[in-house]
Image (tube, coloured by chain):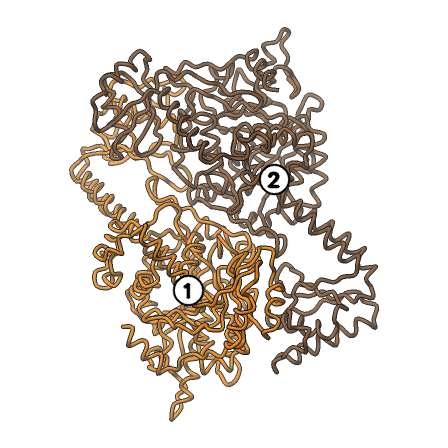
Chain colours: A orange, B brown
Amino acid sequence: MEVTRKNYKDCLNTVYSAIEEADFLAIDGEFSGISDGPNVSALTNGLDTPEERYTKLKKHSMDFLLFQFGLCTFKYDQAQYITKPFNFYIFPKPFNRTSPDIKFICQSSSIDFLASQGFDFNKVFCHGIPYLNQEEEAQLREQTEERRNQHANGVGTPSFISPSSSKGPAHVPEEHKDFINRVIEKVEALFTNAEKTLDLEPCTGFQRKLIYQTLNWKFPKGLHVETVETEKVRTCFILTSLASCVVMCKIMDVIFCEELNDAVGFSRVIHAISKSGKLVVGHNMLLDVMHTIHQFYCPLPEDLQDFKEVTMCVFPRILDTKLMASTQPFKELITNTSLAELEKQLKESPFKSPQVATAEGFPSYDTAQEQLHEAGYDAYITGLCFISMANYLGSFLTPPKAYISARSKLIEPFFNKLFLMRIIDIPYLNITGPDLQPKRDHVLYVTFPKEWKTSDLYQLFSAFGNIQVSWIDDTSAFVSLSQTDQVQIAMNTSRYAESYRIQTYAEYIQGKQQEKEKLGQTTKTWGEDGWVKPHYRIFCRYPQFLFILLYVWPNFCSRGLRKRSISPVQGEQGSGEPLITDGWSHYSYPDSTGSKKMKTDGV
Amino acid sequence: MEVTRKNYKDCLNTVYSAIEEADFLAIDGEFSGISDGPNVSALTNGLDTPEERYTKLKKHSMDFLLFQFGLCTFKYDQAQYITKPFNFYIFPKPFNRTSPDIKFICQSSSIDFLASQGFDFNKVFCHGIPYLNQEEEAQLREQTEERRNQHANGVGTPSFISPSSSKGPAHVPEEHKDFINRVIEKVEALFTNAEKTLDLEPCTGFQRKLIYQTLNWKFPKGLHVETVETEKVRTCFILTSLASCVVMCKIMDVIFCEELNDAVGFSRVIHAISKSGKLVVGHNMLLDVMHTIHQFYCPLPEDLQDFKEVTMCVFPRILDTKLMASTQPFKELITNTSLAELEKQLKESPFKSPQVATAEGFPSYDTAQEQLHEAGYDAYITGLCFISMANYLGSFLTPPKAYISARSKLIEPFFNKLFLMRIIDIPYLNITGPDLQPKRDHVLYVTFPKEWKTSDLYQLFSAFGNIQVSWIDDTSAFVSLSQTDQVQIAMNTSRYAESYRIQTYAEYIQGKQQEKEKLGQTTKTWGEDGWVKPHYRIFCRYPQFLFILLYVWPNFCSRGLRKRSISPVQGEQGSGEPLITDGWSHYSYPDSTGSKKMKTDGV
């Protein structure tokens, strides 16, 4: 179901009940770009630590706009899943003149890619549903309360007060006199007839100024004059005589509440998903999660641990199908984990296509006619992939089970772990516990002149067999040797080199740590004092703290250009090969027992 | 005429000849936003100096995208003007994988405004014409030259070289063997049949890698393998056997040249306008000029004087109709200089609607059905306004003349002066000479706590009659008194104030100057050494220096996010009132003699 600003309010209850009745939800986002800084390969270094990766994505991907959000609900009923797919178009249309005027970045390559997939930009920009984050919502709520009180007290607040206007009649140029006189006549008629409000004809800014000045002088404090933004023009007026103030207040109460709800807009859908506590499934979903929190809740925290805590509040149970497909027992069976390929492979033996039917009143998707990169479709096939893989796990039971529910213990090992793109030895970000810390004894940190290319590194290390190069920037890279015992030999041979320099990974990390400590000593942050830095976990118990925090902790609430994010599916596009199946990278995923233990440790 | 990527090449000659035959050209741009920093009122302080205004616009408006460019050519023929309006859609579609991936900012309010005017974003993003600036063009020319030479020497350069690939056959997983074998068969057939190239079926990234590895091993250096980006997928191949190399080179020469022209794209239209030396008319065109130079020529220079020199090279003769309408003898007759209002007023006495006809084959605009904010339409009515005003000047001649050409001495006083929005006492930026330096003896610079509002300032200065407040930021503003002799009294009364501080304008400027000098001493730039800083004027004589400079002068060629600009017409929207007609601001524009003198001084 396509949902835009036009039909959004009519659809809301349908969305709520779909979430309420669902066994699990699948989501997907489309974004206006991927990286506003380094190129994608620098953004995803193969030997990033989870902290480094989070920091990079936060810095270089959050200024983009999540402008299409796919939600597909899955409800198990009589041996089949009933699906309700929604495709939301999202745009931060300014709510009024004082509301935030969001700026977001577009990346030409991403826009061009979406355009080639038939993406409808007009639907986004002309009819996208607005939204507010928690801070903006709270601010607007406060403003609304203030306006309501003013109305209740009969205090009209004209939007425009010229300090000199009440001193005498405004000078009305000859050519505008007729227009202004017509306005005054209409206003005077207000006091005698039954009408409570009066819409004036559209006019220019100059004429509006004249109206305000003349009315302020003629009816000092006796009128509420307001500029109302309509679809086409911003220069209409509503005038209300004070005589009808009580009626007005009641009307206004309703209007204010409606306005607030309209402004919160799409965020209400995310709140409903969050409150439901249902399992939320996504494919390569780290950036979807980051964007969703950033756009509809609050700016992302500096610290990875804080991010994990916020994530658990917003999405108490998440599952990443790309991680699931790259993990035992699927890893051996699935050669390409990109969403489109995964969906195809899961139709073939030993997997089974799940039995699904689209709920009545919803347009049904046909997986034979791929509509990839429409968020609603991507969410739909992500859900299908999850079902196929979950059901496959049932075949290991004795007796085998053909249907595994979203609440089954069998899928718990995959909960709350988000796939990490292109990190060689850390397959996932563990949201509910400490991250894996693989040994990197075979890794060297190499610095060199910026003219060097990958082939220079291959040449340099040609004596050490196969190597793997992970570029950091123009003048440095990690070089992984295939055998750890050759590290010392490489170090020894490089001792007298002038053009390049080699450190072990341990030395590199130590150096970075020292740098960080040095920096910490000079710019001690609030958090380090141990008494102001809030624990994000508090949000779970007292959600209102999420808002209060935004004012208390300035670091956290970084202003300026609002930050946005990336399409992971786009990122996959170029290199469909499975990245964790390298020949000699023998790291294997923890089995389900191990994961469960870690999860228990973490919580 | 709507021009997109689809019909662009077919239209190019039509555009060239329209420019060639025209008496004058009118232009207009639509942008993805206005200001990425302060709000618009802070961006356009009423007492900015021209340097300050330029610096602000450069800093806060150039990251937006000029995505629609209107050009309307006007040719006088048999007592009427023949018009050819063009409406170009522009988008920096990446040319290939190594070409710049432009990021640009969108401002929600601007996008929303254009959406409400029926702007077609799909046309921009799906079919916009690409472009390159001078530096990018030169780089691509170099690359093309390199590739051409490689082809001429018969050296194939596969896009992907795996250093290990030639050591032995690639390991092809079972499920891909059929596919790879089919590829090898087709390639072997190349050597025996007459075909010169071979398109392979689309495949995944992993399969592509396998193909490259296998072919590199099977046919070492005997094949040119290339990935070609087609509209839909990036995974096709073209293979060429070396046997047909001579034919290939010739084909490639043509292809390369065509590719380069395609990539330079819309910039060719701007080059044609520039080379024509024709009078270019715009309405409130400072930002149009800045964006055009920035997007299609080079990043804007730091210094206002350098900007003026570049502008004169790109647009040797420009005229701003908003400035013309705000200047004698039009100032007294025209109450509202916004484009739409101006166009209406110039249809009424004492002005005359010009005789115009749309050239055959061009869709004609109807000014009764306003299509404002479509760049082509705005350019068209800007041209009409210019003609009406120019012809009106003819009525002062003895005997009066009904038609005044674009080459008439009568309009020369308006040449090369760009309207400055909302500056109280400097109506224009003088491109070919020094700017006006009005006395600001009646202006005070006030700093105060950030809680203060305009009303606090009015209260503070209530004893001094009418004042005018120009906000600088949260804690400072200029306050203009109506009488200069009260400045000293205001200064005296404020002597012991604690919460606020007052300086005269002269003191403020002096302080700023000292700050600048202090800064200059610590961070001496190349330019200040007097031997490296180039003169932009050199471009006029040797355009190639424009490119060389970009490498020589690093300050000038700031990298990172490319800078873009603003819709002046949008900016006007909110406040249609004529801004230079304030009651007590008695500054009057220099008459034509004065301007001419200044122009002569400048050149």
Q: Disc 1 residue type? A: Ile
**A350 or A426: nearer the viewer:** A426
> Residue drawn 48% across and 54% down?
A32
A555 up-or-down from A166: above or below = below
Give how far across and how far down residue A391 sits, in percent. 42, 82
The residue at the far top in this view is B398
B319 up-or-down from A260: above or below = above
Query: Which label belongs to residue A229?
Result: none
For disc 2, the chain is: B
**A342 or B544: nearer the viewer:** B544
Q: Which residue is mark 2?
A: B552
**Which picture quadrant has residue A213?**
top left
Residue B274 appears left or right of A28: right
For disc 1, the chain is: A
**A202 or A338: nearer the viewer:** A338
Disc 1 versus disc 2: nearer the observer:
1
Q: Which image quarter is the C terminus of chain B in?
A: top right
The reply to whether discs 1 and 2 touch (Cβ–Cβ < 8 Å) is no
Q: Which image quarter is the N terminus of chain B in?
A: top right
Q: Disc 2 residue type? A: Val
Residue A1 visible to the viewer: no
Which structural element holds mark 1? helix
Give how far across and how far down residue B492 sits, in percent. 24, 16
Q: How many marks?
A: 2
Q: Are marks 1 and 2 on the same chain?
A: no
Q: Quick one: label 2, few (<14), some, or many (20+) residues within 10 Å?
A: some
**B457 or A256: nearer the viewer:** B457
- Distance (Cα) linking label 1 and label 2: 38 Å
Q: Which residue is mark 1?
A: A509
